[in-house]
């Protein structure tokens, strides 16, 4: 268990490509932090630098009270779970789990006891004598977890551990991993490109884009107050609606239409207006025309896809709200409106 | 699963025939002949042959020269196989870690593969030549009075070195591709689990290379036993005398130089049986311990 501190940590490859721009953040003891972003955003590189598999070319990394920039991965007191499990195919489950302990000079009796304990925790007891090739995807994933747990590390690193599993198993493992982390209280860094995983598992989310941190915050903060249009469109399914609008005399207007809401202290000029699909009400006091072209029936709720002022727009309504293609009036909740700079995309 | 089938028996037979004919003409027929002629004593001038039963075989058992060559073949095969595998593995592991201009290194290391065995033997002669060979000179510096073709051990050394050198590229290519087929994340998991790169190699990398190593072991034993003929022939310059040679070369020598076709046939039958036993042994005993992913 440890505090992890990154101080302007960056990665520049010998060919000059800057995969991770200098990034600083601190992860509290026992905290579960998710690094999320599209592929190629540098999230895996960042994780691999923490693991020591990738050299840190700028800044300093502290795990606990040690600076570990030049510490061997095996000595960083970390455990890592890989995307494709990375089990040793020639070893049994028992040996796979115990391998790290064996190399630390733990006695055979202690290893066996710890392996048994980890196996019990992860329902692997029956499988200890099998080889990885005789296991299903979910079982392999649990062995990979067991290998991490048994080392009793001060930091867990997860590199998209669930992306090789089918949707159902993924949901189940997501809960298992989170529960396990809670129980053990080990500081964790979890990399994923799946925003649902990020939202559901994280204590705090770090959103990365092109090697740069876009926003750090709790899932609720990230969801409700995105720091940029990138975060707004990346997090949430369906994503936040973003439409071109103008601020005129303190009022937000789309295509010169009626006022959608107050713009607060925002100066006049073009802006990007963001609003979550569920923060929109149909009918009522609405005075903004919305052209519904497709109604997606999802059982518990409906998604209405269409256009607002000629721009794509989606509305999320409960199953009790009837809707059909055609034009209707909608009301955007004023407190849910988010304004972004039309040039930089940053929140205003 | 849908099973495809032939409607007539003749099409599959016709498709198999060329391959079967090649095997029949170049293996079964000569092998049959060898077995048959091993029971006869041929007239050196080809005027006839006498049936002698197993005499050709029993003669070999009591022939001290033959036994000495057999023993040399065993040692020679072991040395060539071991060194060509070990050096190639070392080179492959190192080449696998090279980042800059990796392709150039790999191409350079594979080049030797294109050299024909007699040429390898000839280059061996040039390097080990008594008067002009640079390796001979190097040995001289260390006080080793090296005499190729005169001293038994010295000639054997040249034979082993030339044969190993010639075989390294093949093994290198296979080891390198074997190393590259090990998932990167498995190696990385091992890096986190184990500080020592040496023990990582023996506990993780080497076991995962085992299928490649096993395949190469068979290939290399066969190479050392049979394919080094060209190297040996060139190095001995047709003057076998008291020099070391392998069983295959002895077969050639007795049959085509000594005109003892019966004895030579008996030797090749023995070799055939030997290879058969070796192959069965390898597959039964060693392959079982190998993990194929």
Image (cartoon, coloured by chain):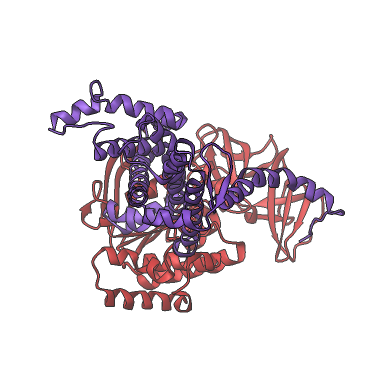
Chain colours: A red, B purple
Q: Residue B277: tell me if it is visible.
A: yes
Q: Nearer the viewer, residue B99 or B215?
A: B215
Q: Where residue A243 sits: x, y (%)?
A: 63, 40
Q: Where residue B217 sits: x, y (%)?
A: 43, 51
Residue under the point 29% across and 66% down? A102
* Side of B276 where B132 appears, left or right: left
Location of residue A273 with respect to B8 vertically, above or below:
above
Q: Nearer the viewer, residue B51 or A147?
A: B51
Residue under the point 79% across and 59% down? B2
Quadrant position of residue A169: bottom right
Q: Nearer the viewer, residue A230 or B252?
A: B252
In the rendered picture of this protein, how many numbered marks are placed on residues? Answer: 0
Give the residue furthest to the top: B132
Give the residue furthest to the right: B7
**Which quadrant is home to the N terminus of chain A?**
bottom left
Q: Residue A348: tell me if it is visible.
A: no
Q: Where residue A240 sits: x, y (%)?
A: 60, 48
Quadrant position of residue B170: top left
Q: Where residue A282 sits: x, y (%)?
A: 72, 55
* Side of B44 where A251 appears, left or right: right
């Amino acid at each position: 268990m440890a505090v992890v501190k990154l101080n302007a940590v960056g990665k520049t490859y010998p060919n000059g490509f800057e995969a991770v721009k200098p990034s600083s953040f601190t992860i509290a003891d026992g905290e579960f932090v998710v690094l999320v972003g599209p592929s190629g955003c540098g999230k895996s590189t960042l994780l691999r630098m923490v693991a020591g598999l990738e050299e840190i070319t700028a800044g300093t990394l502290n795990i606990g009270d040690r600076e570990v920039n030049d510490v061997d991965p095996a000595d960083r007191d970390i455990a890592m779970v890989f995307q494709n499990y990375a089990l040793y195919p020639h070893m049994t489950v028992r040996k796979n789990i115990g391998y790290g302990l064996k190399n630390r000079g733990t006695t055979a009796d202690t290893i066996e006891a710890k392996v048994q304990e980890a196996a019990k925790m992860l329902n692997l007891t029956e499988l200890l004598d099998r080889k990885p090739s005789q296991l299903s995807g979910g079982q392999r994933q649990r062995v990979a977890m067991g290998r991490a747990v048994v080392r009793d590390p001060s930091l867990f690193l997860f590199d998209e551990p669930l992306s090789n599993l089918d949707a159902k198993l993924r949901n189940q493992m997501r809960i298992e991993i989170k529960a396990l982390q809670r129980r053990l209280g080990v500081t964790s860094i979890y990399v994923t490109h799946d925003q649902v995983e990020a939202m559901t598992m994280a204590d705090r989310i770090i959103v990365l884009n092109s090697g740069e941190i876009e926003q750090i915050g709790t899932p609720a903060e990230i969801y409700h107050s995105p720091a940029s249009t990138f975060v707004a469109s990346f997090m949430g399914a369906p994503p936040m609606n973003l439409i071109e609008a103008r601020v005129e005399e303190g009022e937000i207007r789309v295509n010169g239409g009626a006022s959608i809401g107050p713009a607060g202290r925002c100066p006049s000029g073009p802006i990007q207006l963001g609003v979550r699909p569920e923060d929109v009400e149909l009918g009522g006091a609405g005075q903004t025309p919305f052209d519904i072209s497709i109604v997606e029936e999802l059982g518990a709720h409906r998604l209405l896809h269409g256009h607002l002022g000629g721009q794509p727009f989606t509305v999320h309504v409960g199953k009790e709200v009837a809707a059909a293609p055609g034009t209707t009036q909608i009301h955007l909740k004023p407190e849910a409106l988010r304004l972004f700079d039309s040039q930089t995309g940053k929140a205003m | 699963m849908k099973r495809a089938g032939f409607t007539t028996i003749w099409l599959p037979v016709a498709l198999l025939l060329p391959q079967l004919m090649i095997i029949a003409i170049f293996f079964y027929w000569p092998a049959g002949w060898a077995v048959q002629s091993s029971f006869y004593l041929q007239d050196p001038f080809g005027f006839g042959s006498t049936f002698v039963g197993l005499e050709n075989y029993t003669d070999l058992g009591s022939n001290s020269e033959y036994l000495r060559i057999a023993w040399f073949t065993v040692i020679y095969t072991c040395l060539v196989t071991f060194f060509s595998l070990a050096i190639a593995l070392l080179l492959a592991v190192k080449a696998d870690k090279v980042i800059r201009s990796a392709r150039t290194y790999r191409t350079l290391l594979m080049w030797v593969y294109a050299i024909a065995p007699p040429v390898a033997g000839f280059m061996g002669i040039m390097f080990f030549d008594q008067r002009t060979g640079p390796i001979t000179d190097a040995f001289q510096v260390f006080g080793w009075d090296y005499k190729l073709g005169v001293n038994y051990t010295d000639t054997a050394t040249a034979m082993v070195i030339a044969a190993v050198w010639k075989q390294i590229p093949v093994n290198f290519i296979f080891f390198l591709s074997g190393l590259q087929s090990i998932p990167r994340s498995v190696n990385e998991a091992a890096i986190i689990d184990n500080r020592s790169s040496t023990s990582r190699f023996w506990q993780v990398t080497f076991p995962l290379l085992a299928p490649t190593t096993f395949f190469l072991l068979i290939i290399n034993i066969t190479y050392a036993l049979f394919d080094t003929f060209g190297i040996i022939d060139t190095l001995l310059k047709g003057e076998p005398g008291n020099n070391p040679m392998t069983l295959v070369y002895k077969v050639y020598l007795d049959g085509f130089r000594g005109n003892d076709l019966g004895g030579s046939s008996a030797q090749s039958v023995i070799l055939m049986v030997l290879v058969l036993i070796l192959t069965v042994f390898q597959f039964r005993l060693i392959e079982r311990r190998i993990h194929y992913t």
